[in-house]
Each structure stands twice: as C-alpha cells, then as structure tokens.
Amino acid sequence: MKIIKKFIVWNEKWNTGIKKIDEQHHHFVGLINRTHLLNLHGKTGEKIEVLLNDLTEYARIHFSTEEQYFVDTDYPGAEEHIKKHGQLLKKVIDFNGKFEKENESSKIAEELLHFLRDWLDNHLIKVDHKYIPWLTEHGIS
C-alpha cells in the first residue's frame, strides 16, 4: 500500500496566535489537502460538489470571524481586507457555478487546487498576518 503525503503540511510560522483563526486556518489547509487527494485520484463529481460546499461554508464562517474581530477592535485595515474577502468568496462561488455548468470534476479539482494554494500563499500567509499585531494589542487571542 502506497502512503500519500499531504500536499500541504502546516507550518508553525503560519500561526497567528489567535486561537479561533488558527483553528480555521488549519481547517483550510485540510480542505486544500482534500482537494489534492481528489485531484490525484480523479474522484467523482459528487465528492467535488461536497468539497465545494464545504469550502463555501468555510469561507463564509472564516471571513465572518475575522470581520467581527475587525469591528470589535476598530481595525484600520478592515475595509481593504473585507474587499479581498469578497473577491475570494466570489471566486469560490464561481467554482460552484462552473462545476454545476460543466461538471468536469477532474479539471475543476485541478483549477481549484491552484486557486486554494494561491489563497494560502497570498491571503492566509501574507494578508491575514497583517492584522495580527492590531488584534492581539486589542485583546484578541
């Protein structure tokens, strides 16, 4: 039996020190790894549909968590950050629509994997870490 390594292994430097956000980010990495496995094994459209639904739910919950912290602390970078959330959520919703229209699960899984990896590298790691000092200084942990 072949052991398949995770596509993304959590790196401790990605921790924000904010428990709820770190838990959600860990869940996000799990979604990336699920997408990788589906892509690797060419799984059925039904499994891609479940993954897309989970991703949509994750995005809404996670963005809502961050945005509530922004409101609670009057975060000065909130408007720009929330705008980026809207762009990411739109892309997730677009993947749902594309899947419903085309139902090419292997192609969509590959595109989704690239999108999620970019989200990890450019939003979770870079953009999200900009708010850490502000939130922690204002008592969010």
Image (spheres, rainbow, N blue to C red):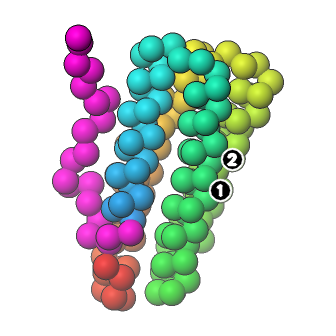
Residue 137 vertical position relative to residue 60 in the rendered view, above or below: below
Density class for disc 1 (Cα within 10 Å; few <14, some 14-19, many ≥20) is: some
* Few, some or many residues within 10 Å of mark 2 (<14, 14–19, 20+): few
Q: Secondary structure at mark 2?
A: helix
Give the numbered dot on residue 114.
none
Observer-nearest residue: 39 or 123? Answer: 39
Q: Which residue is mark 1?
A: 86
Q: Residue furthest front?
A: 1
Q: Which residue is mark 2?
A: 90
Q: Report the span colored magenta.
A: 1-20
Is residue 21 one of those drawn in magenta? Answer: no
Q: Is residue 16 magenta?
A: yes
Q: Say what amino acid the circle numbered 1 marks.
A: Gly
Q: Is residue 80 above or below residue 42?
A: below
Residue for point 39% across, 42% down: 30
Query: Is residue 18 visible in this depiction of the protein?
Result: yes
In this picture, residue 14 sits left or right of residue 31: left
Q: Is residue 80 visible?
A: no
In this rendering, position of residue 108 left or right of residue 141: right
